Image (spheres, rainbow, N blue to C red):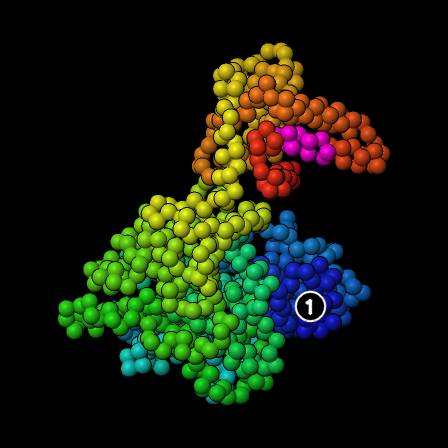
Amino acid sequence: MIPGIHPYYDQFIRIAGLSDRTCNYQIKEIFLGDAENFKISCIFVTLDDLRQVIIWDCSKKTNLPGNIKNELIKHLQNSGAYAGYLFLQDAVVQAISMRGPRLEFERGAYPYPELPGEDVICEYQEITLALDSYLDQLHKTVSRIFFRVYGEGELAKQELIVLSCILKIFFRKILLEHGIDIDALEGSLMHDLITLGSAIPKYLDNGPEPWADQVISSVMVEEGCSVRVPEPIRIHLTDPVMVNRAIRRLLNRGKMIRKKKAEYTAGGCDLSSLFSSQVFAHVVRGLKEADKPTAIIDPLAGDGELALVILRLFDSQEKSPSDYFRKIAGAIFTADPSLSSVMLTRFGLVLQMMDGSLMHPDMLRPCPWNIMDIFCSNVRPGNTLLTREIEDEYLSVQQAKEAVCSMRPIDQCWLMELTDTRAMLITAPCRKMNLKTPEMGQYLCKRFKSYSHEALTALYAAELAIRTLNHDSYIFLPSSWLSDMHAAQFRKMLRESRVTKIILEEPSESGRIHESWSCISAGEPLPSIMITRIADDGFTRSYPLIKEDLPETDGWNPEDPSGKEILNCLAKDTVPLSEYCLGALYRPCDMERKTGCFLSIQFRQGQLLVLSGDSPDGNADLIIKGPDKYLEGLLQSELISWYCRFVTRTRSAVHPEQLIAAIPVHQPDWFSPEERMYVKQIAESLRVRSFLTRKLQYSKAFHDRERIRKKLLLADEMLNEGVYSLYQVPVTLHEQLSFESMRTIHQFLR
């Protein structure tokens, strides 16, 4: 049973087959307004990869009408969840998957699908297009009133004022779906939350307030509320991350239309590629297995998307909305220099806190203002890369003041409310900023060891987090920093820092490293760094690297040190396959209509396939004239299979013909009785395996087939032991080679 969950809800999760993967859950009551105000209880189940599944509790009904089921499908589409389970009377279960062949309920509880390479948020294309269309119409309506009142002279304030009105419209639409009148909520917690989630934040306490006139703002909101919400959007059911992404797309479209370069752009802030990476899933599962973080710090948060997703790890079973608000207010610490980004962060967090609690009596009671102040202090505008010392880089006082107003260095009191030692810094600093002004260059050069004229903002943010914040840190960065020339100083800084772990994605078959993600983890200083590499199928391998062994200037290729030891074994007393065969390597087109004995070799999906027969295989990469039982057994061994995978993993764009021709073949010493014995062992093992394989084809009894399979495994072990002995591979590495080989075979067959 999941700790703390009521047995009534636990049975639903267990029947759906999600018990082992459940990380968190939240019980909600939703209103399906277009379906005769139908009210239904549901459970949002957060899995260990932070994806969500919905369980609808209709256990008191034998069936649901078609219009209700259609509303549930729209609920699933708007929620960003990947699957839904509908529980009816008499333990009848109907399931629906967003990635299924058909978007409809099917009888039976199907297991949650494994979806590698998918975003944590499942965005349905029809919802995305409808949101973009609705926001465009909303923006035009509100902007028309803005220009009618203020004209073209207040363009600097237009984006913030119009954005504030759009956020208020969203809140009002949500309340209307629940039949709540916002004008009757003055002084309540709900009213304060809505004000907090739509207000334009102030950078400095004594700075100007970029507010629109309240009367004009009310007119803009009223006019915006008249814009019809298109199908199939359900405003009150839409996931906050999906809404924030849609609003950010709207703001970016406006900047492109104006053709003006913003001082702080949102380029690179789309984190969907991070959420779909194996690195992110690995880190999240590690956080789940350990104590869940009690506070999250994101010093360059963008639109707060990462904080909103990580918030799914937090328990949300507080007794009242005010308790949950108090918990979140003291647990989320984000900063960003863009006021619009801070607005979206606060808007998303408020939506998250209000979700499923609008009808709670506590929402109508007053809210302690100290909680609001704490929230505004923790989620604030400011550039964490800068301090007020940036003023010293300017010659005139006026330029210094303008720089502070435009760059917005972080206030010293940020993080003062953070007292919990179990807080974790989790950030993906992908925001692009203008860092190439002379004054900015001087400032960064003085304060950052990773300074480079072409360095990205993310590298400075990562150094700042590692160097100044004494918390466990998980910093997500694109893997390009391992090889980029401008990241040389950053790599040098890492060798001297308190970084303890680097998590990397294995290069894909295309070899495009810049598309993959990495995670840098910092803790207590250690002389070595633990490297964890994750393959596309989720397989992980970890090994330590001494920091002093990493190059200071050149790019890093943090391969397993045991790989170098194996390569040294492969280099002793060996020649390339092409030399061993005296250059007699043929392509299939050269061997058409030839007869005799041939070895056909091809490399597919990390596996070396060798076929022996009287005719050459037309699909082979290279063909060798046979027979040569020793070479045939050698090419099918775990050691040579490892070599081929290692080369394709560490070198980009290796052609199969080049790979096969360069395979290191050990030349036996025929005067050595020991080596002659190993060669005989390899050939005999190959003969036994060939005999058993043919015998397995004709065996029908289950026990006979199992006995043959066990003998086949013994024959493979004898073959690999002979190869290991010839190449003098240490015994300590045999198990590692065997495990990787079996994993590759299973992946190839799958």
**Residue 615 x %, y %:** 63, 16
Is residue 719 part of the magenta span, yes or no?
Answer: yes
Region rendered in magenta:
713-723
Judge left or right: residue 338 versus residue 103: left
Residue 94 at least partly seen? no
**Residue 97 x %, y %:** 64, 55
For the N terminus, the image quarter is bottom right
Identify the residue at horizontal 46%, vertical 54% (top origin).
Answer: 528
Identify the residue at horizontal 20%, vertical 60% (top origin).
Answer: 438
Q: Secondary structure at mark 1?
A: loop
Q: Nearer the viewer, residue 739 or 339?
A: 739
Q: Amino acid at mark 1?
A: Ile
Residue 661, compared with residue 483, is above or below; it is above
**Residue 653 x %, y %:** 45, 34
Residue 322, compared with residue 536, is above or below; it is below
**Residue identified by numbered label 1:** 2
Q: Nearer the viewer, residue 552 or 356?
A: 552
Q: Nearer the viewer, residue 83 or 167?
A: 83
Residue 546 at least partly seen? yes
Q: Nearer the viewer, residue 211 or 725?
A: 725
Identify the residue at horizontal 52%, vertical 19% (top origin).
Answer: 580
**Residue 273 x %, y %:** 47, 53
